[in-house]
């Protein structure tokens, strides 16, 4: 992958070291300068070497004792050489140099082992055999570290994605590795040393990218295919982080909603980057689901406030996808709110706010949600919350007063004929049931005016009868 350039090879006003009779002498060459920075890269990657000189010079990368040597004679100016370290043994300059003056480069020594081996290689710019600047090419051992699943919305135009940086702006990791059919599966391969063959790995020995269905029904053959033919337009490189992205549509290759897949990138011993009988691989998974969306509500309708209300929902669409949400009513008191564009968030949720301040309470209406290109369509009834009734509660406190009355009979002798009962010199005090809360009937009451509606004699008889009754009740 594109290597970071170090600062050690800055343009210098040269001090030329001459060896004369074993003695080191220096000379300044006025106005003559060159630049050959240090460069690092992984075995199998493309490394980029930027070199410059203000006079006719010779550029050397490697040398006769390094087992690999390329040279640019009669060089002047500035250029960037894209050196494919995977193709250093192919004996094809067009494969070896992917950027720069291919026609001017002379391959003095091809590698006999294919991709040049991890090591440090000298580089320099010389004029008449005198070094104007020197640098070092460091080739590191490559590794395969793993793979991850990302998703890209179907609405993203692939023609607008020109680089790994552009791609990263349009992809996220999906929840539970689920991808709605129509959105794109993106494999993020965390491996170094693969950019030298990644654009044509379908024709490269010992490398594969396979998809295998893992939840096929019993006694059926799982869907399985190779994606070695993914074009360079669907392959993107993050050179800084050693990540290569592969983009795959989920509408072809026999992929159906409900399918789950293992995706495996593998290198085996027939590839020159690893030892014979060895293998490296990285695997990730994804599941294809139907394109769905729903609006959050409880019960049969979405109840909104008379005013601003936030409407939320969930969807299987890729985060970053956009949908249109509107609220409307036909007929009397008709209205239309929206449509409003809602964007799916990283957790597959969305939300927006509507103002129902001008809609009468109790009004029923419809929410309608439309997904990209009409791929999702959802209608849900709604209602503006009715006015709540005010309820008045009256509390009544009842106080009950009980009056106890003591009736005393003094020096009264009552005689009756036959079954008559005589009460004499007795005092009766009722304890269980009160007789009455009216004024007590006494001899004094009678003597002072008698009982209302009775003659005096009759009143006296009534007094005796009352006394007898009182005694009976008290006993």
Image: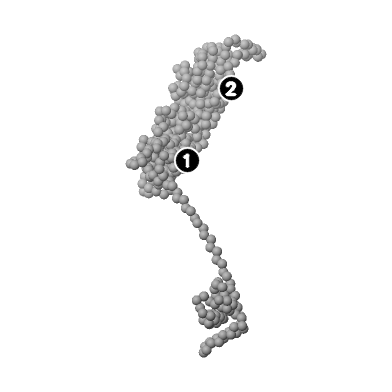
The percent position of residue 350, horizontal first and vertical second, equals 45, 39
Instruction: Name the one closer to the observer, 390 or 474.
Output: 474
Can you see residue 300? yes
- Relative to 450, 320 lies left or right: left
Observer-nearest of 11 and 203:
11
Cα separation, mark 1 vs mark 2, equals 43 Å
The crowding category of the residue bearing disc 1, from other C-alpha atoms within 10 Å (few below 14, some 14 to 19, many at least 20), is some
* Tag 1 residue: 347
Provide residue 200's location: percent of width, then percent of height.
Answer: 42, 29
Compared with 343, 1 (above or below) is above
> Which residue lies most toward the left here?
331
Q: Residues within 10 Å of mark 2 (few under 14, many from 20)?
A: few
Residue shown at the point (60%, 80%) measured from the top left:
409
Toward the viewer: 318 or 225? 318
Instruction: Return the disc, 1 or 2, that comes first in the chain's sequence.
Output: 2
Residue closer to the observer: 163 or 216: 163
Residue at image position (57%, 78%) is 447
Circle 1: element type: loop
**What residue would you read off at disc 2?**
7
Of helix, strand and loop, which one carries label 2?
loop
Color style of the picture: one colour
Residue at image location 56% in from the left, 69% down from the top: 402
Of the two numbered discs 1 and 2 in the rendering, the one whose residue sits closer to the viewer: 1
Tag of residue 418: none
């Amino acid at each position: 992958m594109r290597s970071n350039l170090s600062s050690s090879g800055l343009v210098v006003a040269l001090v030329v070291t001459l060896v004369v009779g074993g003695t080191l002498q220096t000379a300044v060459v006025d106005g003559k300068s060159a630049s050959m920075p240090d460069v690092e890269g992984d075995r199998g990657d493309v490394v980029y070497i930027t070199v410059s000189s203000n006079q006719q010079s010779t550029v050397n990368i490697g040398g006769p004792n390094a087992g690999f040597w390329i040279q640019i004679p009669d060089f002047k100016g500035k250029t960037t050489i894209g050196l494919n370290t995977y193709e250093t043994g192919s004996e094809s300059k067009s494969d070896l140099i992917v950027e720069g003056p291919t026609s001017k480069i002379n391959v003095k020594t091809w590698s006999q082992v294919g991709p040049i081996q991890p090591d440090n290689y000298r580089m320099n710019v010389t004029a008449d055999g005198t070094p104007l600047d020197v640098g070092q090419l460091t080739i590191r051992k490559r590794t395969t570290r793993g793979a991850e699943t990302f998703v890209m919305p179907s609405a993203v135009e692939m023609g607008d994605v020109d680089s790994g940086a552009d791609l990263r702006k349009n992809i996220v990791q999906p929840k539970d590795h689920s991808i709605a059919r129509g959105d794109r599966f993106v494999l993020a391969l965390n491996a170094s040393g693969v950019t030298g063959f990644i654009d044509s790995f379908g024709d490269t020995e010992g490398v594969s990218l396979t998809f295998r269905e893992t939840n096929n029904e019993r006694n059926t053959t799982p869907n399985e295919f190779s994606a070695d033919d993914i074009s360079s337009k669907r392959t993107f490189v993050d050179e800084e982080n050693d990540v290569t992205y592969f983009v795959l549509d989920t509408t072809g290759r026999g992929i159906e909603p409900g399918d789950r897949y293992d995706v495996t990138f593998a290198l085996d011993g027939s590839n020159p980057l690893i030892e014979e009988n060895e293998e490296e691989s990285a695997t990730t998974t994804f599941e294809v689901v139907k394109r769905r969306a729903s609006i959050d509500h409880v019960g049969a309708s979405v109840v909104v406030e008379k005013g601003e209300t936030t409407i939320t929902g969930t969807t299987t669409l890729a985060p970053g996808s956009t949908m249109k949400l509107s609220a409307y009513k036909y007929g009397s008191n008709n209205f239309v709110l929206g449509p409003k564009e809602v964007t799916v968030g990283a957790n597959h949720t969305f939300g927006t706010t509507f103002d129902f301040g001008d809609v009468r309470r109790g009004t029923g209406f419809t929410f309608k949600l439309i997904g990209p290109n009409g791929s999702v369509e959802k209608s849900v009834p709604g209602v503006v919350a009715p006015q709540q009734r005010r309820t008045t509660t009256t509390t009544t406190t009842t106080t009950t007063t009980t009056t106890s009355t003591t009736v005393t009979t003094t020096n009264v002798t009552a005689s009756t004929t036959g079954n008559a009962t005589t009460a004499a010199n007795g005092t009766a005090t009722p304890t269980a049931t009160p007789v009455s809360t009216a004024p007590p009937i006494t001899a004094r009451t009678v003597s002072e005016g008698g009982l209302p509606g009775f003659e005096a004699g009759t009143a006296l008889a009534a007094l005796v009868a009352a006394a007898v009754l009182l005694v009976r009740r008290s006993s």
